[in-house]
Every structure is written in structure tokens, then in C-alpha cells.
Amino acid sequence: MTNIELAKAVNLSPSPCLARMRKLEASGVIRRYVTLLDPITAGMTVSVFIHVSLEKQIESSLENFERAMSERPEVMECYLMTGDADYLLRVVVPDVQALERFIVQFLSRVRGVGNIRSSFALKQVKYQTALPLPERRPAADGHNKSTRPVAKRRQR
């Protein structure tokens, strides 16, 4: 969307709209802009969720694992988890052979990895990149207000 289109959508003139965007970028609220590719069309037909348990959950093992995952382009997401596994990975590869290479030649060799369990995604039912921000509506004074309910304070 162009700045002019965005300004029109949020009921601002283009110059203040651009200034607000720059402020959001500088503050880190907007981290980057991306183009979303269709994985199937791009030849990345296998999407797998991999549960990884480490031998020991000590800081050096966690840091080593996270550093290793950060370096791999097929690891789309990596989360430190509660529950049965220490990490949950979302890995996207072109085929099962590429997944095998990733697991056997890389993941199983990462120092500290104790257990690996994989689940293939059969179908993507929902994929969303936009955060579920609260809707905003204009108030009587012309300023935007959140529609999120505000908790009332107890009076003493």
C-alpha cells in the first residue's frame, strides 16, 4: 500500500502519515517489510514441525542450539517451549530428501540435541502474518480510541 493510500485509510494527510511510519520504524515497532511468497509455487512443498529436546537445559546448550537454528534458512520459526520438548521448529524444504539431509546431516549433529520428533503438515488451514491489533475508532473529540475494554479501577 502506498503512503497516500495508507493516509487515506487512517484519515491523515500523507506527510503526517509518513512521519508516523518513520517513527514506528525508528522505535522498532515496524521491524522490516517483506514480500510473502507462496511456498508451493516457490517449490517448497514440505512443511514440518519438529520438536527438539536437549540433553541438558543449561544456558550454554540453549544458546548453542539457538545460534545453530538462526543460521539455517529452512528453519522458518524456532520457539523455546514449555512442555515435553524444549524447542519447536517450523521447517520448510522442497522434498522429503531435503528434510532427511537437514535432520541427519545437521540437526542431529547439533551439540546437546537429545531427541527429535517430526510432524508433517498435511494442509495449511490458516496462515496469518498480521498481528491481531485492537481496532480503533474515532472518538467524539476526533481522536482514535481503542475498542479494547478497559478494566475499571476499584474504589476504596
Image (cartoon, helix red, strand yellow):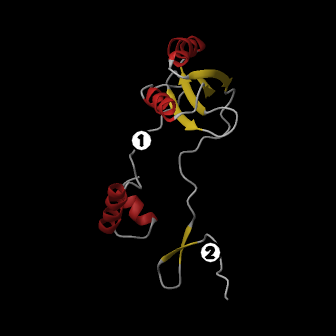
Q: Earlier in the sequence, mark 1 or mark 2?
A: 1
> x, y (%) of residue 58?
54, 33
User: In front of the other: label 1 or label 2?
Assistant: 2
- Label 1: which residue? 34
Badge count: 2
Query: At label 2, which amino acid type do we have?
Result: Val
Residue located at (40% from left, 59% from top):
5
Query: Is 37 drawn above or below residue 104 in the view shown?
Result: below
- Label 2: which residue? 150
Name the secondary structure under disc 1: loop
Packing grade of label 1 (10 A; few <14, some 14-19, many >=20) is few
The one nearer the camera, 125 or 156, is 156
Name the secondary structure under disc 2: loop
The one nearer the camera, 71 or 138, is 71
> x, y (%) of residue 21?
35, 59
Cα separation between marks 1 and 2: 34 Å
Q: Quadrant of residue 92?
A: top right
Query: At label 1, which amino acid type do we have?
Result: Val
The reply to whether discs 1 and 2 touch (Cβ–Cβ < 8 Å) is no
Residue located at (33% from left, 61% from top):
23
> x, y (%) of residue 64?
46, 28
Query: Is 58 drawn above or below residue 111 in the view shown?
Result: below
